[in-house]
Image (spheres, rainbow, N blue to C red):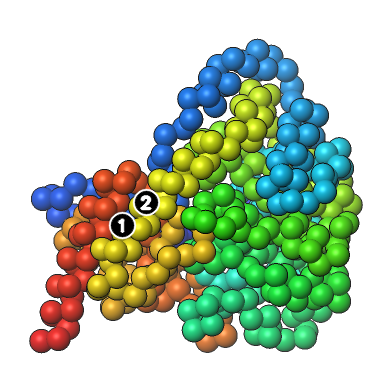
């Protein structure tokens, strides 16, 4: 067996199940889960109709590159969304089966395990796929702690020169999971300069890019254009329909950017057998071409955020994120105790922040935080917020005795 499999940690939700194993939730309350970032808003009918209307595609083997129609649609969407020149759909855009699968597989393409003890850098807390991808590509993950004291910025000075010399791949997530922070242009400038200096590839995870209240988040390709990098050298972005269009089960996304890197990733995927189902390609075209359902999706999240923040503000240090559908909240007790006791007393499930992070530079930056995914219905989300507020008030009374 591959010995690197032994380096993989349990997934956060496995840790959560273990945390709750001996706990019985209060039966007086209905169960509400805010732990998993799985969209619960209704899938638009026109997308399901597109699936039904294109079932004949099941009789064809799909190609790795996907149809011209899909890649043209993706290129057009990127140009419109980010106000950038139209990408070459043949060389700079590739459909993938959801961003998770592609983010993992990408490391297998980029990492040269025979060269200089390779390193993969990623933010901390982080999406655990980055870590697993690094290990199974033969690299070592190193973490940049993101903390509330500096607005969860990527502080590149945390890692020494030797690590940067060995870095072959950097994962970033903007809007960020779990903080919802959007990387500003000056941070992209620094990262691009470091990529030029050390030669590493940047994988920009942008699966939450369409969940925002007012201002569309800056994207990596957009930042590259603003900084006079029209060839997107050593930059690939990853996006998905899951959050944007409420179709996580479709497993539909894309990668786009540096044509040289995309060419190698396409070669890898040809052998990996990762071609997108033709039926899903047709439905994806319909989804990417429509923005009305995306605007309605944003409206639902914006409404939930406004109401939940109003309920929680009096008892917890909560503020609106730049984007995405998470609240990242510091807890008055340990994050695991908070999650465990909240589940036991009020049947509300939240995710301890320490499960989303690793100890690096002497700290676990997820400790004493919890992540709330505002994905349930509006009524359920508001009810959960009320229970969390009541639970926190009782904690305050106990702690002040």
Q: Is residue 45 left or right of residue 30?
A: right
Q: Image point 82% across, 75% down: which residue?
A: 193
Residue 303 tag number: 2
- Provide the secondary structure element on which disc 2 rests: helix
Residue 328 tag number: none
Question: Do residues under tags 2 and 1 come within 8 Å of each other at their CB atoms?
Answer: yes
Q: Position of residue 166 (x, y in %)?
A: 79, 75
Residue count near mark 1 (Cα–Cα under 10 Å), binned few <14, some 14–19, many ≥20: some
Q: Quadrant of residue 351?
A: bottom left
In this rendering, is residue 3 above or below 150? above
Q: Position of residue 387 (x, y in %)?
A: 20, 59
- Provide the secondary structure element on which disc 1 rests: helix
Q: Is residue 10 left or right of residue 317?
A: right
In this rendering, is residue 330 above or below 55? below
Q: Which residue is denoted by mark 1 in the rendering? A: 307
Q: Image point 65% across, 33% down: which residue?
A: 289
Pick whichever, 15 or 95, lies toward us.
95
Residue count near mark 2 (Cα–Cα under 10 Å), binned few <14, some 14–19, many ≥20: few
Instruction: Give the spatial CA distance, label 2 vs label 1.
Output: 6 Å
Q: Image point 14% across, 86% down: which residue?
A: 400
Q: Position of residue 399 (x, y in %)?
A: 17, 83
Pick whichever, 97 or 380, lies toward us.
380
């Amino acid at each position: 067996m591959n010995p690197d499999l032994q380096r993989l940690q349990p997934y956060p939700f496995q840790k959560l199940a273990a945390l709750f194993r001996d706990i019985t939730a209060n039966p007086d309350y209905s169960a509400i889960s805010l732990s998993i970032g799985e969209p619960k808003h209704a899938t638009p009918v026109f997308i399901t109709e597109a699936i039904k209307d294109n079932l004949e595609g099941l009789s064809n083997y799909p190609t790795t590159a996907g149809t011209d129609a899909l890649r043209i649609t993706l290129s057009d969407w990127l140009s419109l969304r980010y106000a950038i020149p139209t990408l070459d759909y043949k060389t700079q855009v590739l459909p993938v089966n959801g961003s998770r699968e592609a983010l993992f597989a990408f490391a297998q393409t980029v990492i040269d395990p025979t060269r200089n003890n390779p390193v993969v850098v990623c933010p901390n807390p982080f999406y655990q796929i980055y870590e697993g991808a690094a290990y199974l590509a033969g690299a070592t993950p190193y973490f940049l702690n993101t903390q509330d004291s500096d607005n969860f910025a990527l502080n590149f000075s945390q890692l020494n020169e030797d690590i940067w010399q060995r870095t072959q791949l950097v994962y970033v997530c903007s809007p960020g999971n779990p903080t919802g922070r959007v990387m500003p242009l000056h941070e992209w400038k620094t990262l691009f300069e470091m990529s030029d200096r050390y030669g590493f590839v940047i994988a920009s995870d942008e699966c939450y890019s369409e969940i925002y209240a007012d201002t569309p988040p800056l994207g990596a390709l957009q930042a590259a254009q603003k900084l006079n990098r029209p060839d997107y050298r050593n930059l690939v972005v990853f996006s998905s329909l899951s959050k944007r269009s409420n179709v996580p089960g479709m497993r539909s996304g894309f990668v786009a950017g540096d044509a040289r890197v995309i060419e190698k990733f396409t070669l890898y995927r040809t052998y990996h057998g990762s071609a997108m189902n033709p039926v899903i390609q047709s439905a994806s075209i319909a989804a990417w071409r429509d923005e009305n359902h995306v605007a309605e999706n944003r409206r639902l999240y914006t409404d939930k955020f406004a109401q939940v923040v109003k309920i929680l503000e009096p008892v917890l240090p909560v503020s609106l994120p730049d984007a995405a559908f998470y609240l990242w909240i510091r807890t008055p007790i340990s994050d695991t105790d908070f999650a465990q006791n909240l589940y036991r007393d009020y049947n509300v499930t939240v995710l301890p922040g320490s499960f989303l992070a690793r100890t690096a530079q002497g700290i676990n930056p997820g400790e004493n935080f919890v992540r709330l995914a505002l994905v349930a219905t509006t009524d359920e989300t508001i009810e959960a917020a009320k229970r969390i507020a009541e639970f926190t008030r009782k904690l305050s009374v106990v702690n002040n005795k």
